[in-house]
């Protein structure tokens, strides 16, 4: 990040203190500088200014910040607010599934992951997390089915290829193991070059 970016956004806040988008951009700037407390304040201010707007990135970053700081109740609050104000995306339903999964409530997690897929079928991560639940239950066939659906939704999700490789290693399908190993390497190179 350019060193002057923070100064630019701070000055912009002074010039337009009631601008939701400027506070949001300031929050993103603070995140990039790893100043999470300041980022939290900026995102909360943006939400105060426009509480009924979608504010996807404000909720997204607040959820991540509170997850990192292990403030689970605040994280859940912003997940619920994200669901309430962003009805056209499955991301926040997915996050609620993650919340229940970390609480050990697989059935509730499955419900939220499935809802996420209904809202956003091309979002690959819920497929992976559903597969993980079925894999833990010993149902490799269902796990494989969800992982394949995840790859269909987005063929460049690294963790899905890693999990497919594990399942194929268990069944000793070396051709498929090698295919996913190659895809993992391609994705890693692509990510490095991005």
Image (cartoon, helix red, strand yellow):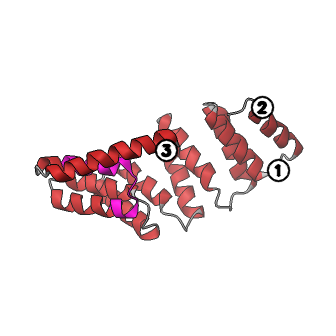
Disc 1 marks which residue? 18
Q: Position of residue 95 (x, y in %)?
A: 45, 53
Disc 2 marks which residue? 4
How many dots with numbers?
Answer: 3
What element does badge 1 sit on? Answer: loop
Residue 69 appearing in the image: yes
Q: Nearer the viewer, residue 139 or 152?
A: 152
Q: Residues within 10 Å of mark 1 (few under 14, many from 20)?
A: some
Q: Residues within 10 Å of mark 2 (few under 14, many from 20)?
A: few
Is 159 one of the magenta-colored residues?
yes
Is 47 one of the magenta-colored residues?
no
- Does the CB distance between marks 3 and 1 fall below 8 Å? no
Q: Position of residue 50 (x, y in %)?
A: 73, 57
- Does the CB distance between marks 2 and 3 fall below 8 Å? no
- Which callout, 2 or 3, points at the residue further toward the start of the chain? 2
* Residue visible at 31% across and 64% down in the picture: 149
Structural distance between the alpha carbons of marks 2 and 1: 22 Å
Disc 3 marks which residue? 73
* Residue visible at 77% across and 47% down in the picture: 22
Left or right of 189 in this view: 38: right
Above or below, 151 relative to 177: below
Left or right of 58 in this view: 74: left
> Which-is-in-front pick, marks 2 and 3?
2
Q: Nearer the viewer, residue 20 or 128?
A: 128
Structural distance between the alpha carbons of marks 2 and 3: 35 Å
Quadrant of image for the N terminus: top right
Q: Nearer the viewer, residue 24 or 45?
A: 24
């Amino acid at each position: 990040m350019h060193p002057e970016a923070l100064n630019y956004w701070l000055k912009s806040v002074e010039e337009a203190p009631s601008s939701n988008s400027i506070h949001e951009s300031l929050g993103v700037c603070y995140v990039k500088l790893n100043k999470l407390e300041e980022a939290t304040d900026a995102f909360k201010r943006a939400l105060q200014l426009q509480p009924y707007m979608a504010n996807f990135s404000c909720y997204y970053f607040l959820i991540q910040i509170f997850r990192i700081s292990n403030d689970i109740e605040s994280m859940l609050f912003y997940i619920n607010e994200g669901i309430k104000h962003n009805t056209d995306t499955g991301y926040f339903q997915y996050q609620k599934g993650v919340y229940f999964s970390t609480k050990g409530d697989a059935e509730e997690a499955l419900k939220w992951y499935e809802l996420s897929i209904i809202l956003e079928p091309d979002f690959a991560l819920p497929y992976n997390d559903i597969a993980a639940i079925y894999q833990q239950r010993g149902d490799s066939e269902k796990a494989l089915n969800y992982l394949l659906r995840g790859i269909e939704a987005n063929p460049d999700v690294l963790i899905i290829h890693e999990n497919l490789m594990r399942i194929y290693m268990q069944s000793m399908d070396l051709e498929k193991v090698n295919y996913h190993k190659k895809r993992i390497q391609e994705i890693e190179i692509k990510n490095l070059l991005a």
